Amino acid sequence: MTSPDADSDNKDVQANPPVSGVPAAGVPAAGVPSSAAPPVRPQPVPDGPPAPARRVRGPVSQVRINGQPSFVLHSYPYKETSLIVDLFTRDHGRIAVVAKGAKRPLSKLRGVLQTFQPLSVSWSGKSELRTLIDAEWVGGMLPLERTALLCGFYLNELLVKLLARDDAHRALFDHYVSTLNELAHGEPAQIALRKFERALLKETGVAADLSRSTTTREVVQEVSNYVVDPERGAREARVSDVWPVVSGKTLLDMEREDYGDPATQSQSKQLMRFLLAHHLGGTPLNTRQILIDLMQL
């Protein structure tokens, strides 16, 4: 009499017969003693956690910006028919774009990419040098002429040399627009430039506090004399100081953006020239020298 377990084993063997020439698992091949079967070697265990799976990157999508308020700061030739244009944009800061074919006589960009004119600009790309897609003249601003034109180039040179790329400064952009308008409408250049220089240093995070003494932490006194440390701020003047000495009133007037006093105009010009030279690392400003030579004619 066959046991139920035996019948079950026979059924399993019939349902899964061994492949011809290949012994069943755990059964040695015919004519080979069981002691001669190859030993099973343990697999080495790797040290540390398993390496992460490598991610396959897809193609990088192009970023496109449309209709961005912008001004041309500077441009120069690129290859035979193109330009590289330095733009000051409202929401993306200072960027560089290549304007393909802009030097061709029939290119619509040829007469649009002008300085001191508000533009609506579109570009694409994620690298440091984008590709200009379109630029349209917006209008609404008077052109700069004579000394005002040189002052405008001075503003542009400051922005090119002091602003990092791709660093948005919306408040400074608006201040730039208002300064161009002031210059175009005949506002005193010295006052417009001092306000912009101060705003530029504030926006880039290097403007020192002019309202308090860094040594006493007291409010600056109008009748006292001070010097301004470019990295720290105002302090009381000493006999040995070689930095520009200004009155406390000048410092307070600059904080209030009040340049009506001729003494404030004169002292603030010397002070801002000193501060800008420090933050520019001694790099000369070409337009400033032109302005100085012009004033001496």
Image: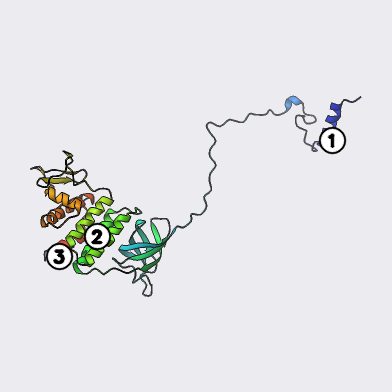
Secondary structure, mark 3, is: helix
Q: As shown in the figure, which amino acid type bears the numbered disc 1?
A: Gln
Secondary structure, mark 2, is: helix
Q: Residues within 10 Å of mark 2 (few under 14, many from 20)?
A: many
Please tell me which residue is depicted at 35% across the width and 66% down the height of the picture: 119
Q: Is residue 14 above or below residue 189?
A: above
For the C terminus, give its image quadrant. Answer: bottom left
Give the side of residue 238 with respect to residue 257, left or right: left
From the viewer's perspective, is the residue at label 3 or at label 1 nearer? 3
Q: As shown in the figure, which amino acid type bears the numbered disc 2?
A: Leu
Kindly indicate the quadrant of the structure image that contains residue 237. top left
For the N terminus, give its image quadrant. Answer: top right
**Residue sitting nearer the eye, 245 or 248:** 248
Q: What residue would you read off at disc 2?
A: 155
Tell me residue 31's x, y (percent).
80, 29
Give the side of residue 20 with respect to residue 199, left or right: right
**Residue sitting nearer the eye, 209 or 54:** 209
Determine whether label 3 and label 1 are within 8 Å by CB. Answer: no
The Cα–Cα distance between marks 3 and 1, rounded to whole angstroms, is 109 Å
Q: Is residue 253 above or below residue 137?
A: above
Kindly indicate the quadrant of the structure image that contains residue 23. top right
Q: What residue would you read off at disc 1?
A: 14
Please tell me which residue is depicted at 21% across the width and 56% down the height of the picture: 195
Q: As shown in the figure, which amino acid type bears the numbered disc 3?
A: Leu
Tell me residue 223's x, y (percent).
9, 47
Q: Earlier in the sequence, mark 3 or mark 2?
A: 2
From the viewer's perspective, is the residue at label 3 or at label 2 nearer? 2
The Cα–Cα distance between marks 3 and 2, rounded to whole angstroms, is 17 Å
Q: Earlier in the sequence, mark 2 or mark 1?
A: 1
Q: What residue would you read off at disc 3?
A: 294
How is the rendered protein coloured? rainbow
Q: Is residue 241 above or below residue 185?
A: above
